[in-house]
Image (cartoon, rainbow, N blue to C red):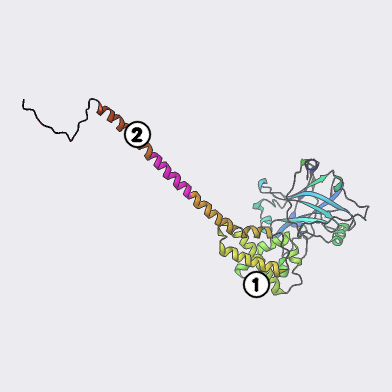
Amino acid sequence: MDTQRETSIRFETFTWKIQNFSKQNTKKLQSKAFRIRGYKWRIRLYPLMKNVDHFSLYLMVADSLPPYGWDRNTYFKLSLINQLDGNKSVVKETQQKFNGGYRSWGSFFVNRSVFFDSKQGYLVNDTCIIEAHVCVSDLSSLEVNTLNTNSPTSKSKLGDEARRNSESIEQEDDKETETETSDESETHSSTSCGSSQTEGEVQSSDLTLKDLLDLGSLGKEEAAFVPLLEEACIWHPSLIRSQRKSSRWFRLWAFTSLGQVLYLLKTSKVKDMNEDACNRLHGLWEELVKHSGFQLSWLEPYVESALGMKAHLEKTEVVNKLKDSVVALEIKMKKLRGELAAAEAEFEVTRRALVEAKKGFVELDFNADLGYAMF
């Protein structure tokens, strides 16, 4: 994006204050529709069912629009406000293109247990505060096209997009019985929006990892992978979709193998990536790519970076040895310079003493005869 376009984009903020949270229907909880520059939006909470242990939020299109023939380029941030320490507020920022196939985008924010712990600051006095910061541009390319249905719908090239089911969303938006919170405030602020880093996207889906795997049957080692796998599935729902028709044992192998890779990347340090660790990671990764059926382009750069650590460590070892040699030689040269300076000082003292000693001194031939005289 060039400078001219960056300066034309501004954030506008909608604040959703949810009071009496414990009394809300958290399976169907969404904000009232709010309008920014003529576009209608909602914030929606990922259904907090018994088998969901994460708190996730979505920004969704609230306009009644056809399933094709329109798109909406948007920069936005969703913020879960920490009411005890503003520095601990969780903010997820991204740039996305909404259209008939992609009406809702969102992300994992905190673990469910963290959210419900009032000492953490996200749910205080049974109240939580959520903000949507939406960047709307004056550029014509960001205008919604609802009339020209013959115009092609732009397709996102991002891997693992969070695809929403168009029909189900339209039906839900048309329902007036949908649960909404009554205490909301809308504020608008105009702030410059520069380039945003694209984050992973989330699809709202009824299927979770717990629906595909018997997590209770996992061993202690495999159970450690579960939080990482659940987070990955939230950001990349294709992981769930790709295994819906697989056998129980294949799912277990696929997700366990993916969990091993994620756990290795999460817990290993650069110094740990020796030849054995790299070989292990390489073997796991090859098996995953060839046989799991997962779309793993989002993870590939991190695996390649980790595998490249072995060469980096070897290079680091060479560099460190040379650094040590340079330091040792500098110390030796400093010592020799000190010895040289001392020798030069001693030389000067001795030279001056020699000059003084030579005054009135006559050299004799030591081989000459001493002799004596008779007269």
Q: Which residue is mark 1?
A: 217
The residue segment tinted magenta is: 324-338
Q: Which residue is mark 2?
A: 345
**What amino acid type is highlighted by mark number 2?**
Ala
**What amino acid type is highlighted by mark number 1?**
Ser
Q: In the image, what residue occupies the spot 76% across and 66% down?
A: 241
The image shows residue 99 at horizontal and vertical percentages of: 85, 55
The residue furthest left is 374
In the image, residue 335 lies in the stretch drawn in magenta: yes
In the image, residue 173 lies in the stretch drawn in magenta: no
Q: In the image, what residue occupies the spot 67% across and 71% down?
A: 253
Decide which of 181, 16 is in the foreground and name it. Answer: 16
Residue 211: quadrant of the picture: bottom right
The overriding secondary structure of the stretch rendered in magenta is helix
Q: Earlier in the sequence, mark 2 or mark 1?
A: 1
Decide which of 99, 168 is in the foreground and name it. Answer: 99
Dot 2, crowdedness within 10 Å: few (<14), some or many (≥20)?
few
9 left or right of 270 in image:
right
Q: Secondary structure at mark 1?
A: helix
Q: Secondary structure at mark 2?
A: helix
The image shows residue 368 at horizontal and vertical percentages of: 16, 33
Above/below status of 180 relative to 288: above
Specify whether residue 372 is in view. Answer: yes
Dot 1, crowdedness within 10 Å: few (<14), some or many (≥20)?
few
Above/below status of 344 relative to 34: above
